[in-house]
Amino acid sequence: MKLYELTLNNVFYVDQQRKDIYLVHVRYPQYFKLWQPALPCVKAKIDIKDRVERPEVRFHEGKFTRFNVTYHFPNTGLSKPDYKVNLLFHSEFIKITRHHIEHVHKNLLEQLPDDFTKSEMVSLDELEENFNNDGYVGQYLQATLQAVS
């Protein structure tokens, strides 16, 4: 038996020149015990696609001035039915990963891995350096369960 934490994964930004996709992984304070073999990451079987707002982002003079995520989970049994996090002030809830892709305009989501635990992590500062509003996507991708160390 292993303890897992719910993580909400969002396709945040596509850098078309470098052919990179940046994902924002937001930790949600809900834990599960799984009896299956211990894996670092498991796709969560929870349908919340319609309950996730696009991240509220403002970018001014090369810096993020607002970076909020909001999730609404009424009637799901999760611990916090309305969950809003300001990721500029609560960086402990965020992980940013970068994924190189072959084709920018074709099947973006199919080019991403199922397990993000071994993905290249980047800092918020590095994301700011490469960010351009034209590539902002802000689309919810999926929920996963990440093993708690």
Image: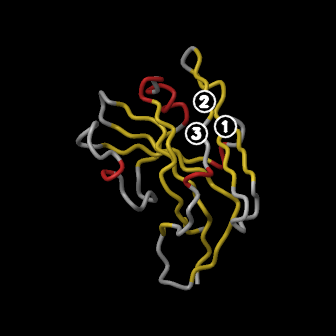
* Label 1: which secondary element: strand
Q: Amino acid at mark 3?
A: Arg
Label 2 – label 1 distance at C-alpha = 7 Å
Dot label at residue 54: 3
As drawn, 116 above or below 124: below
Disc 2, disc 3: CB below 8 Å?
Answer: no
The answer for how far apart the CA atoms under marks 2 and 3 are is 9 Å
Callout 2 secondary element: strand
Give how far across and how far down residue 11 sits, in percent.
46, 43
Q: Position of residue 100 (x, y in %)?
A: 31, 43
Query: Which quadrant holds the C terminus?
Result: bottom right
From what the image shows, is residue 80 above or below residue 59?
Answer: below
Could you say which quadrant of the image residue 56 lies in? top right
| Left or right of 56, for residue 36 | left
Residue closest to the eye, 77 or 4: 77
* Point 45% across, 35% down: residue: 13
Q: Residue at x 27, y 37 (%)?
A: 105
Above/below status of 24 relative to 59:
below
Res 68 label: 1
Residue 25: assigned label: none
Residue hosting label 2: 57
Q: Residue at x 37, y 31 (%)?
A: 15
